[in-house]
Image (cartoon, rainbow, N blue to C red):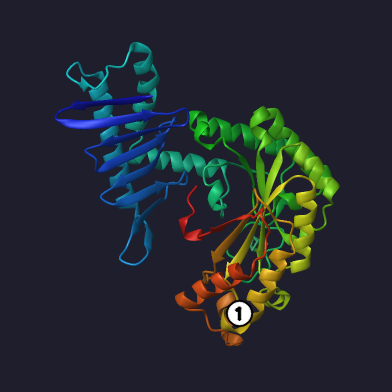
């Protein structure tokens, strides 16, 4: 439904969808909330702001040469939230005003559909947003990362932490690995539904089973967790995605993945990072390129699609040649096709990981921006898929907001 008009000499356009409400005023401001009224996006003066459920807001804009981004400080986030709430209040008052000049006056049913979301969005000011972020933190462990095509997924945390925690470049998970007992997972699902309320409609395109490698759980524990999602969400639980690492992924058979596919598993995301085994050993990643190939074969033969993530720049200059050759060869050995994905993710050195000291000890020089681009192009240039090619995309972890 689209509502447009003028009030107080300002034009507005409101678009109400099943999952969201977007409003633009004065052509310089676009604000969007979900159906629970939670602000999730603002476009203002050439910059986009994305609010995560954890309360943080990422600002993105195009600089002179590249895309720029930064996290807002708390006072800046509060100002943005209060300004958006005020705009939604003005829109609500305009919709209710007898003096509003409509392009086409909404009937009673259309107003009844529009006003509850506008009321909620109007009430979602900085104080409400803070309370909301606290409620989110009571329901979820911090969500380390999601693949870029899953930012609007429904995350359900069946496990916590990572089952390895050995990779020297990774700082994503800070809890020990734990598989939730099924009763606890059912309670988590109920808590998530209760927390999200009508906001859940924005996140119903898929379920992402967290955290780092939920599929590492043994089948007798995994199957009841999948069944719990089916009982809670019915048909919506037929599009489940999850990370899997090459090491434990290879321990599951094609038959195991077939069982999980029957319970809704549709895509797995595998952090290959590199096909060059000496580099994987160097960063203590507990898998080989062959393990990942085997995992991809097993999942694909079960009808589960695959997204493989290759890291650009890992191992710097020291491993560059082997990384390019073996990563391309490993990707070429996978039965990837249409419906699958290859992500190139530029390596970002995290200061609070063992990697910087390791790299310094072995005189590993980080690649320059030009070398990173050349490495990505070199791997891509060696890929030899037939007519049915996987999609190739960029995975920039700095863009992650949930
Ligand atoms: S397996 Fe993945 S999540 Fe776990 S430590 Fe390694 S990179 Fe991080």
Question: Can you give x and y, in whole percent of width and height, for residue 275 in the image?
Answer: 70, 70
Ligand 1 is located in which of the four quadrants?
bottom right
Residue 360, quarter of picture: bottom right
Viewer-nearest residue: 388 or 75: 388
Q: Residue at x 63, y 32 (%)?
A: 236
Residue 242 in view, yes or no: yes
| 75 relative position to 54: left or right | left
Question: Which residue ends up furthest to the left in the rendered image?
Answer: 9
Question: Can you give x and y, in whole percent of width and height, for residue 363 in the image?
Answer: 57, 88
In the rendered image of this protein, does residue 218 appear above or below residue 352? above
Q: Residue at x 26, y 22 (%)?
A: 95
| 259 relative position to 92: left or right | right
Q: Residue at x 63, y 75 (%)?
A: 324
Question: Can you give x and y, in whole percent of width and height, for residue 292 in the image?
Answer: 74, 62
| 311 relative position to 66: left or right | right
In the rendered image of this protein, does residue 174 appear above or below residue 179? below
Question: Can you give x and y, in whole percent of width and height, for residue 247 in the image?
Answer: 76, 62
Label 1 neighbourhood size at 10 Å, few (<14), some (14-19), many (20+)?
A: some
Residue 173 in view, yes or no: no
In which quadrant is the N terminus drawn?
top left
Q: Mark 1 = which residue?
A: 320
Viewer-nearest residue: 22 or 327: 327
Q: Is mark 1 within 8 Å of ligand 1?
A: no
Q: Residue at x 67, y 79 (%)?
A: 322
In the rendered image of this protein, does residue 392 appear above or below residue 204? below
**Label 1 secondary element:** helix
Q: How many marks?
A: 1
Question: Which residue ends up furthest to the top in the rendered image?
Answer: 108
In the rendered image of this protein, does residue 282 appear above or below residue 121? below
Viewer-nearest residue: 284 or 300: 300
């Amino acid at each position: 439904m689209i509502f447009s008009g003028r009030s107080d000499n300002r034009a507005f356009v409101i678009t109400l969808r099943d999952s969201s409400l977007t409003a633009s005023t004065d052509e310089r401001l676009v604000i969007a909330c979900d159906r629970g009224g939670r602000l999730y996006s603002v476009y203002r003066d050439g910059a986009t702001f994305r609010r995560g459920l954890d309360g943080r807001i990422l600002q993105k804009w195009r600089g002179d040469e590249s895309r720029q981004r930064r996290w807002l400080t708390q006072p800046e986030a509060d100002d943005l939230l209060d300004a958006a709430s005020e705009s939604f209040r003005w829109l609500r008052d305009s919709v209710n005003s007898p003096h509003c000049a409509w392009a086409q006056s909404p009937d009673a049913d259309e107003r009844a559909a529009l006003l509850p979301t506008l009321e909620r969005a109007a009430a979602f000011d900085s104080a409400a947003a803070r309370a909301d972020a606290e409620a989110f933190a009571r329901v979820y462990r911090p969500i380390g990362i999601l693949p870029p095509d899953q930012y609007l997924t429904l995350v359900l945390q069946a496990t916590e932490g990572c089952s390895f925690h050995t990779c020297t470049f990774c700082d994503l998970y800070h809890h020990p690995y734990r598989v939730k007992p099924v009763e606890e997972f059912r309670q988590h699902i109920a808590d998530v539904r209760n927390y999200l309320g009508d906001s859940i409609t924005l996140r119903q395109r898929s379920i992402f089973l967290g955290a780092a490698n939920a599929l590492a759980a043994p089948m007798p524990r995994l199957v009841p967790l999948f069944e719990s999602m089916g009982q809670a969400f019915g048909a919506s639980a037929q599009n489940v995605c999850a990370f899997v690492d090459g090491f434990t992924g290879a321990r599951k058979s094609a038959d195991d993945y077939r069982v999980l596919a029957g319970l809704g598993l549709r895509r797995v995301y595998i952090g290959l990072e590199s096909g060059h085994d000496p580099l994987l050993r160097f960063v203590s990643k507990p898998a080989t390129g062959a393990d990942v190939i085997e995992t991809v074969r097993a999942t694909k033969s079960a009808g589960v699609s695959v997204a493989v993530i290759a890291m650009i720049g890992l191992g710097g200059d020291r491993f560059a040649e082997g990384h390019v050759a073996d990563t391309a060869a490993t990707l070429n050995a996978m039965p990837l096709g249409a419906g699958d994905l290859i992500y190139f993710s530029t390596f970002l050195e995290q200061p609070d990981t063992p990697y910087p000291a390791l790299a310094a000890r072995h005189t590993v020089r980080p690649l320059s921006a030009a070398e990173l681009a050349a490495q990505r192009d070199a791997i891509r240039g060696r890929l030899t898929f037939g007519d049915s090619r996987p999609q190739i995309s960029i995975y920039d972890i700095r863009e992650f907001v949930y």
